[in-house]
Amino acid sequence: MPDKVEIAQAPRLRKGSVSPRQVALAVAQSAADAPVRVDKTGLELKRGAFLNTIAMLASNFRGIFTFLVARLLGPAALGTFSVAWANVDLVSKIAVFGLDNAITTFIARSQATRDFARSRTLFRAAVVLVLLQSCLVAAIAIAALQLFGHRLRFPSEMISALAFVLCALPGISLYRVCTSVSRGMKVMKHDIFSRGVTESAITTLALLIALGFGFTRFAPEVAAVSGTAASGIVALIFASRLFSGVTARDTVSIWTEAKPLLAYGAPISLYQMFNAFTLRLDVIMLGWFIGRAPGVTLATVGVYSAVVGLAGGLRKVNQAFNPIFAPVVAGMTATGDQQRAAATYARLAEWMLWILLPLVAVMTLAGSVVLLIYGPAFMQGGAWLGIVGIACATNAFVSLGETVIMVQRPHLNLLNSSVTCAIAFGANLWLIPRFGVTGAAFGILLPYVIQGILRYGVLRLVFRWRNPWSSIRPPILTAIIAIVPALMCRLFLDGVAGQVMAGLVFLAIFGVGWLHHRRSTKLL
């Protein structure tokens, strides 16, 4: 017998115009199409994930910028820029005000109902709002730094760098909203060009030009402002082309759509700010404790910033799936198809673990070798890379749950993120003065584990989703089997050789397990 979802999704017919036999045929047709809809969703997810993966890989070219700053200017310059950028990233959540996530959900819903004119109005409203907000926030923040910057506990060079890099806020905000508009229409390729190619290329080129002219003091900040501005403009051009054939409705102004967008984005903005604060808190607080905690200097903060940059690449694994998952799950939950949404979530969770676990293992087993790309002075961060890598992988994995909650009950994300932020602040405040940089690494791992537990509880108790253990069990068991011989190599072989061998052994065994699982699932 068809379930309620199938009946609801059967073709709608006018009252009194059909016979019971026609209704039965319509329901039967909807039930017959269910496997086709599931397969179509899987193909849609794979296609979107593929394009997002390309965008993610392209965005990693930004690592060239970090590499050049570390090599040409040293750990101290990288530390100064990293602390300033961490603060700007936090302020950008205020400037965007949750409009990036809100516009994805709103446009996905209007596209699902084929209200294309409203999609265009929503796009224009989001762009106008985010530009006004970002310029206003940047002006206020720069003025506040000029008046009260001396009261902060940052070194004077960090205050100057922060004031300069705040000029990147309009570009950052414009990029995020315009890219979210494209994702709401399930167009994932735009991010490849706006951020992956344009920002990476312009940032690196601007840095080299600044250094070529002998402008070394604010060279990383100039490069960052130039790259973000270019990426925002390119994202705007690509997003606007999606509406080239759509006529705006004369009866609805952008200010009419602005109110529901801001109302929906308000709780998202708050929990995004909490998330960003949690994400950047370790680097920001290390900046506060320079010279006042064991081993915390401007140079070690620079080394830790490189560690965070490498481990932060694990969060980008989520970017391969989340941009397509958000509009897909928004459409499913809008039509009441909770079972298919839960099955899609479980499928993506398995895919993410097959990718995250080997990357985390390499960072943990061979962290010092990986950091050699920045120079010998960065090898001291090997142990920190393993801890932060586990934290970032945990954050990437549980972010899928954040997306599910966001499109249905965003205020629950606000509650989870506020609790996580409070725990992160307390943990870093207690651990950094006692254990220095190592304390900062553990201070970010603990809140992410707790955040994952909270989000799992919401999915299980509020939305009544079943446990995805059957889906995520294979990659976890494979990782456990592979880690044992890898640890033996790490313990009995010293130096670089031991780290390299341990990483290779894990990857070989894990790869064999993945191939076996893939073949067995094809046979079922």
Image (cartoon, rainbow, N blue to C red):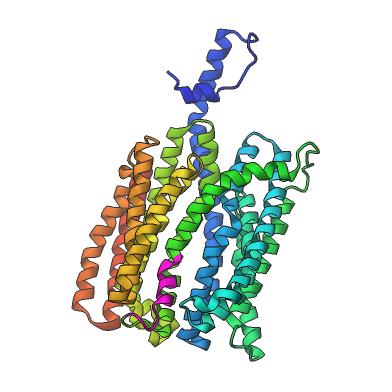
Marker count (numbered) = 0
Magenta-drawn stretch contains 289: yes
Name the chief secondary structure element in magenta.
helix
Above-or-below relation of 233 to 259: below
Where residue 383 sits in the image (x, y, percent)?
30, 75
Work out whether residue 135 or residue 276 is closer to the camera in this orientation and state it. 135
Which of 125 and 473 lies nearest the eye of the viewer? 125
Q: Is residue 80 above or below residue 463?
A: below
Would residue 364 be visible to someone looking at this image?
no
Looking at the image, can residue 29 be seen? yes
Which residue is drawn at the image coordinates 27% and 83% (left, top)? 495
Foreground pick, 376 / 123? 123
The residue range painted magenta reads 280-293
Image position, residue 134 (x, y; %): 64, 61
x and y, in percent, of residue 397 in the image: 40, 54
Q: Which residue shows up at 45% across the image and 84% down it? A: 75
- Image location of residue 234, percent across then percent down: 69, 62
**Residue 458 is one of the magenta-drawn residues:** no
Q: In this view, does 257 lie to the left or right of 363?
A: right
Answer left or right for 391 relative to 340: left
Quadrant in the picture for the N terminus: top left
